Amino acid sequence: MRERQRVEIVRNLLAAQGFLSIADLMAATGVSAASARRDAGRLAEAGYGQRVYGGIQALGGAFSRRMAQASLETQAFDVSRTINIEAKRAIARRALEMCVDNDVIIINGGTTTFQMAEFLRNTRLKILTNSYPLAEFLIRETQNRVALPGGEVYRDQKLIVAPFDDDAIQHYSARIMFMSAISIGPLGVIEGDPLIARAETKLLRRADKLVVLADSSKFAQRGSLVVCPLSRIHALITDPAAPVEALTMLRDAGVETIVVNPEPRATEAA
């Protein structure tokens, strides 16, 4: 990943989260600790934040304004989609291999699950999703049947979230749900916002099997709301950078764990 790409990713993350540790920078960009420290220093010199012990802190004014505008306590879609994109594409491609024509599936809103869009161009599926950019793509570019839950649109996360139990999805039945999340840990699939956690739980009730799409950055501790335990996961797809202890944890819990190599990035012009 080139330096300008790393700086853009880190700048967006810093604006969204307010503080990034050196470990956060390493996970987001795949660089060494020394390179992460240099990137933090360059951002501070450019006026995007203040270098502090252990990482970089956003300047108070911009961060405070962004947080005041946020409606859900999770990272914005447009920030998350820039992280580990090659791994997310490979994970999404592998997920589609689990589907057959005429399947009924659920795809939750997330940046890894959104990468499934391109690989759905020539499928014939019935798909329920709470991701409105995914739904828009499927309607415009594919012949798949598309269903959406009712609810409120959250622009930053690009989600449709319904607060009610008696909405239309209670009559839906799917063979597989493909889910992404902000974190995977010993307690299971973790989310950071109660509305999102509730929405995911409702979708999960409508599916026989759960397949989690989680790039290696998702094994860091984030969030505090358990959507489901590890025992509910049928399979999890990740990339080779996932921690060995995390893979062992999943396999010990009986989760089929699939590791796929990231797709190579197209060569950029010099």
Image: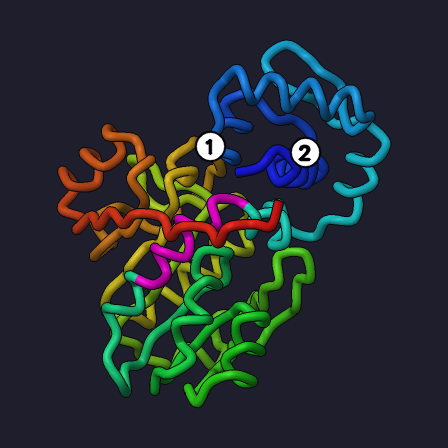
Q: Amino acid type of disc 2?
A: Leu
- Examine the image and state in which quarter residue 172 appears: bottom left
Q: Amino acid type of disc 1?
A: Gly
Q: CA distance from mark 2 to mark 1?
A: 16 Å
Q: Is residue 176 above or below residue 53?
A: below
Residue drawn at (40%, 79%), measured in percent from left and top? Answer: 127
In the rendered structure, the answer to whether residue 171 lies left or right of residue 24 reads left
Which x, y percent locates residue 182?
47, 45
Q: Which residue is mark 1?
A: 30
Q: Is residue 65 magenta?
A: no
Could you tell which of marks 2 and 1 lies nearer the N-terminus? Answer: 2
In the rendered structure, the answer to whether residue 126 lies left or right of residue 258 reads right
- Which part of the image, by quadrant, shows the C terminus? top right
- Examine the image and state in which quarter residue 3 appears: top right
- How many residues crowd around disc 2 within 10 Å: few (fewer than 14), some, or many (20 or more)? many
Q: Is residue 56 above or below residue 223?
A: above
Q: Which residue is mark 2?
A: 14
Q: Residue furthest top?
A: 53
Q: Nearer the viewer, residue 65 or 213?
A: 213
Residue drawn at (33%, 51%), measured in percent from left and top? Answer: 228
Q: Nearer the viewer, residue 2 or 112?
A: 2
Q: Residue furthest right?
A: 61
Which x, y percent locates residue 156?
67, 56
In the rendered structure, the answer to whether residue 20 lies left or right of residue 252 reads right
Which x, y percent locates residue 63?
78, 35
Point out the frontmost of discs 2 and 1: 1
Q: What is the magenta range?
A: 83-93
In the rendered structure, the answer to whether residue 258 lies left or right of residue 198 reads left
SS label for mark 1: loop
Instruction: Count the labels in the image.
Output: 2
